[in-house]
Amino acid sequence: MGEAYIVAATRTAGGRKNGRLRGWHPADLGAVVLDELMARTGADPALVEDVVMGCVMQVGEQSTNVARGAVLASKLPESVPATSVDRQCGSSQQALHFAAQAVMSGTMDVVIAAGVESMTRVPMGLSVSLPAKEGFGTPMSPNQQKRYPNIQFSQFMGAEMVAQKYGLTKDQLDEFGYHSHQRAIAATQGGAFKDEIVAVDGVDSEGNTVRHDSDEGIRYDVSMEGMRGVKLLREGGYITAATSSQICDGASGVMVVSEKGLKELGLEPMARIHNLTLIGHDPVIMLEAPLPATERALKKAGMKIDDIDLFEVNEAFASVPVAWLQTTGADPAKLNVNGGAIALGHPLGASGTKLMTTLLHALKARGKTWGLQTMCEGGGLANVTIVERL
């Protein structure tokens, strides 16, 4: 089997709901990342054999194959094909897996994996609520209802169940959320994101044009007292808005190539993709899947948790990475070193390649080699990607 290499990785800075990116059509936002990848690599556009783009709410402005829309909104020629992927929060991580698999199989040499989500313009849940409102039903089929009677799948309830199952406390989750902001503040003020972010023009609260080159959701005045004072989302529960990922607009992407592609492009690789793992797990607790998925990935790779230098575990809710740390025994100092979705935002379909972009740049900045990324995903799924920085 052939190798797959990442030669470029970039992302927009995260935009808050109705924030600086509210004027951007998602296809145009995705196009920015495609154009930036081409600019960073200097690649001949004719060599790009496919664009695989993650997107969760594929309705409205993100419908009708938003990946193709992004290509047509970019500087890429019409001859470049594209397809949209929905594996819920792991959509663009799965896009990366599909791109890598295409390259490793020898069927393609240059593929872009990307993701986009405008949670301002296409609100979370719209692909379910809008058809239901118009009388076109819901995703829960009669056979699913027989298998899971009287159960409403809920990521929030899954996060609560994870906290309960692993004996976590609200104080633990509040502390994790606080440190997410602290790390994001340090990363932003220290220039850690400078090389990974492609700046775009946005608008401020009054509609004036401003440069959008930093993540908008970071709370620079964060305090432990403030975190602990946020009201629980469910009486007797564990999760608050402050320990949940932020609604976010954004796009991200990486270019994946074969050894032949490396030679044709004349580029030095950022990283080699070492392992691709995917599992299905309990869809009720739902968000627990990254725990067994990480164990499986390490076993398949012949590695131990201490062999990995840095981790990116998506902070959909604080209970997920906290339980992940408890189960894997990973060093907390290696996890989400530049903050995570609690501080930086979780633009659903864009988060997979967003986290990979941050992971690759963080490995380079620290002179480290091995990185592992994983995401919890709706339906009880999880992707794991292990990369080796070169």
Image (cartoon, rainbow, N blue to C red):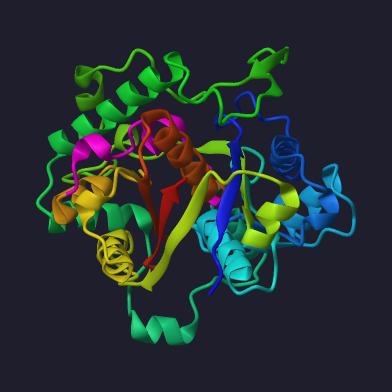
Q: Residue at x 69, y 41 (%)?
A: 37
Tell me: residue 359, above or below residue 129.
above
Q: Position of residue 70 (x, y in %)?
A: 77, 48
Q: Is residue 254 found left or right of 208 in the rendered image?
A: left
Judged from this view, the residue extending furthest toward the left is 167
The residue lying toward the viewer, choosing from 366 and 333, is 366
Q: Is residue 258 found left or right of 353 in the rendered image?
A: right
Q: Residue at x 38, y 25 (%)?
A: 184
Say whether residue 49 is magenta: no
The residue lying toward the viewer, choosing from 84 and 11, is 11
Number of numbered discs overlaid on the protein picture: 0
Q: Position of residue 199 (x, y in %)?
A: 66, 24
Q: Is residue 280 visible?
A: yes
Q: Is residue 286 found left or right of 26 in the rendered image?
A: left
Range shown magenta: 330-349
Quarter of the figure with residue 298: bottom left
Q: Position of residue 53 (x, y in %)?
A: 65, 56
Q: Residue at x 66, y 44 (%)?
A: 267
Q: Position of residue 143 (x, y in %)?
A: 45, 87
Say whether residue 343 is magenta: yes
Quarter of the figure with residue 28: top right
Q: Residue at x 77, y 56 (%)?
A: 48
Tell me: residue 185, above or below residue 281.
above
Q: Is residue 87 found left or right of 133 in the rendered image?
A: left
Q: Is residue 16 visible?
A: no
